[in-house]
Image: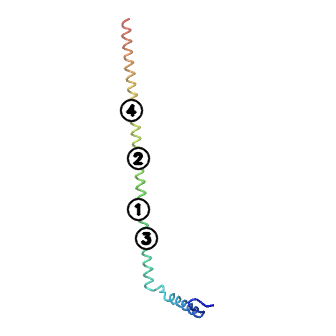
Amino acid sequence: MRTLKGTDFNDRAKNSIEAKKALLARFQSRPTEDDPEVAARREERRRIVEAREVREAERRRLKEEERARQEAERLRLIAEEEARQAELARQALAEIEAKKNLLLEQKLERDRRYAARKARASGKR
């Protein structure tokens, strides 16, 4: 059986060996841990991670401040509403008291007129 592109077993075996050698050479040419470039990249990654942590901490702090501000605003609104309700209740009580006093004055005036009428009527007889 003929192979494609005119390659035979020896060509394929040779290509395989060369590919393995190239892969081994690439792996061996990799810099070691004490290489200045590797140390510089590691330091850069460390600075990036630290900067990210600082930004995240700042974001968390800002969110917490915003939550605290919203809670304070909510409590202020509740206090204002309670004060408004208390003022309305005080006004309602004052109106009720005024109506009660008015009714009492009207009753006293009616009783006074009734007593005066009785006095006039008893004086005619």
Residue at the extreme bottom of the image, as rendered: 10
Mark 4: which secondary structure? helix
| Residue on which the image places disc 1 | 62
Q: Earlier in the sequence, mark 1 or mark 4?
A: 1
Is 25 situated above or below 43?
A: below
| Residue on which the image places disc 4 | 95
| Residue on which the image places disc 3 | 52
Q: What is the CA distance from the residue labelled 4 to the residue labelled 3?
A: 64 Å
Is 47 situated above or below 3?
A: above
Q: Earlier in the sequence, mark 2 or mark 3?
A: 3
Mark 1: which secondary structure? helix
Q: Residues within 10 Å of mark 1 (few under 14, many from 20)?
A: few
Q: Earlier in the sequence, mark 2 or mark 1?
A: 1
Using the image as rendered, state which of residue 121 and residue 21 is in the foreground: 21
Quadrant (top left/top right/bottom left/bottom right) for the N terminus? bottom right
Q: What is the CA distance from the residue labelled 1 to the residue labelled 3?
A: 15 Å
Among the 4 quarters of the image, the one containing residue 88? top left
Nearer to us of marks 2 and 1 is 1
